[in-house]
Amino acid sequence: MKPTYKYIFLLFLLNILLLITGYLLVSFSVPRILFSDIAILTSVFTIIAVITLIIFLRGQTKNPESQTLHSLVAVGLKFLLDMTLSLVWFIVAKKTSLQSVIIFFVLYLALTLFSVLVILRVLKNKSL
C-alpha cells in the first residue's frame, strides 16, 4: 500500500473514532452539544488534513528543493484553512458557547496532531 493511502486510511479511522466518541458524548453526558456540530467539524478538519497530507506526501517524491516547498505549502495551507474555519465557525455561525469552543479546539488538536505526527514520521524515515 502506498504511504499516501496508508496515512489517509489511518486518518479516516481516526475520523470514525472521533465521530463514535462524539456520539457517545452527546448520548450519555452532554445534552447541549449537537452531534451535527461534532460531525461537521470532524468532517471539515478531516478534509483539511487530507489536503495537507496529499500536498506534503506528493512533494516527497520530488527533488529536495521541491520537497521543502511542498512541505511549507502544506503547513501554510493547513494554517490558513484552519483559521478560515475558525472565523466561519465562531463569527459567521455564532458557535461561541463554551461547549462549542471546547469541541472545536479538541478536534483541531486531535487532527492537527495526527498531521504533524505523520509529517514528522515521514521526514524522520526520509532522513535515514
Image (cartoon, rainbow, N blue to C red):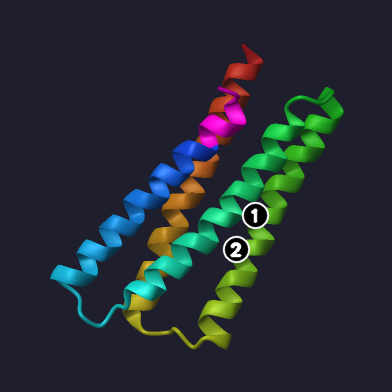
**Which residue is painted at 25% across and 83% down in the image?**
32
The three-letter amino acid code for the residue at tag 1 is: Lys
Q: Residue 67 occupies which quadrant of the picture?
A: top right
The three-letter amino acid code for the residue at tag 2 is: Asp
Circle 2 is placed at which residue position? 82
Outermost left residue:
28
Circle 1 is placed at which residue position? 78
Q: Residue 87 occupies which quadrant of the picture?
A: bottom right
**Which residue is painted at 49% across and 38% down in the image?**
9
Residue at disc 2, secondary structure: helix
Q: CA distance from mark 1 to mark 2?
A: 6 Å
**Which residue is painted at 84% across and 23% down in the image?**
63
Looking at the picture, does residue 54 appear above or below residue 92? above
Query: In the drawing, does residue 81 fall left or right of residue 90?
Result: right
**Which residue is painted at 68% across and 33% down in the image?**
57
Q: Is residue 2 magenta?
A: yes
Which residue range is magenta in the image? Answer: 1-7
Quarter of the N terminus within the rendering: top right
